[in-house]
Image (spheres, helix red, strand yellow):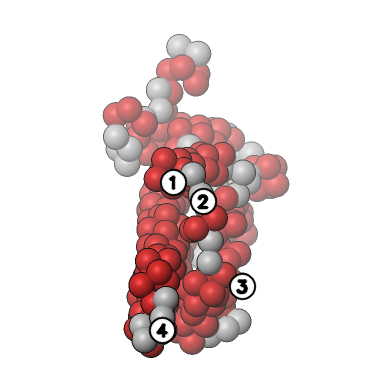
Amino acid sequence: MNIYSVLAFLMSFGVLFIGLRLSTDDLGMFLDLPSIFIVVGGTVAATAVSFQLDRLWFLTKIFFQRVIMGKKIDYRSVIIEMMKISDIYSKGESLENCISKTQDPFLKDALMLVHDDIMSEEELFILLEDRANNLYYSYSEEANKIKAVAKYPPAFGMIGTTIGMIVLLGNLGGSDALKKMGPAMAVCLITTLYGCIIANMAVMPIGENLIDSSKEIYLKNKIICEGMKLLVKKTNPVVLAEKLNTYLIPSQRLDWKKVLGK
């Protein structure tokens, strides 16, 4: 589980709760079931129309897999693993044990392609680059779809507010219209509040999180692609580490001397 994402969500909604609590002692005034139905139901319906109904579950699955359960990539660990595999391969040993122990799916596929020896080195490198690029495109598209959903909650919030205003103005002719106006206006604005909360505290942050995750995965896969180029040439593991370090900023780079105990 990505504990940092979970804590971030808890913090954001904690700030919201404290803000509401500081505004009034009666938090019940912020609860309105018709407004929730209009905003949440309308958002789900519009999303289903935009991306087809069967993809709603897919977008939800992406949220849990890559935001809640996803882990931040440790580039140093990737380079260390590439060093170990390169050392094994350069000594003429089989890659079978490395394939079974590798957890990263992209690296595992790359090692299997090298082990199977079904294509030339040039074809292998082109294939890996294409896979890395296509995977990045797919992940980015998923993130953009979720970000696109963020425009619906505020829109349905305004629709709910408009409905409330129509009802309010339609009842102005009553004898106690002035007494009802204040509470009615509050209910009208709650739908707008719900729309802003859902869009800016949930949907948009999730989309940005997925975009950042896509970039991290792409960089990790690029490091693996470059590492495989060096691996098939049986490059010295230290040289491999230094070349892969060029993809990282200084604070993220691997100190191979500590890995080798020098």
**Disc 2 and disc 3: Cα gap in Å?**
32 Å
**Disc 3 and disc 4: Cα gap in Å?**
47 Å
Identify the amino acid type marked 3: Trp
Query: Where in the figure is residue 50, as x and y percent of width and height?
Result: 45, 84
Give residue 24's mark: 1
Q: Is residue 5 above or below residue 122?
A: above
Which residue bears the numbered disc 3?
57
**Disc 1 and disc 3: Cα gap in Å?**
37 Å
Given residues 182 and 72, the one toward you in this image is: 182
Q: Is residue 119 above or below residue 206?
A: below
Question: Are the residues at dot 2 and dot 3 in contact (C-beta closer than 8 Å)?
Answer: no
Which residue bears the numbered disc 4?
174
Query: Where in the figure is residue 227, as x and y percent of width and height?
Result: 43, 44
Q: In this rendering, would 198 be left or right of 70?
A: left
Query: Where in the figure is residue 206, as x and y percent of width and height?
Result: 45, 57
**Disc 1 and disc 2: Cα gap in Å?**
7 Å
Q: In this rendering, would 28 be left or right of 182?
A: right
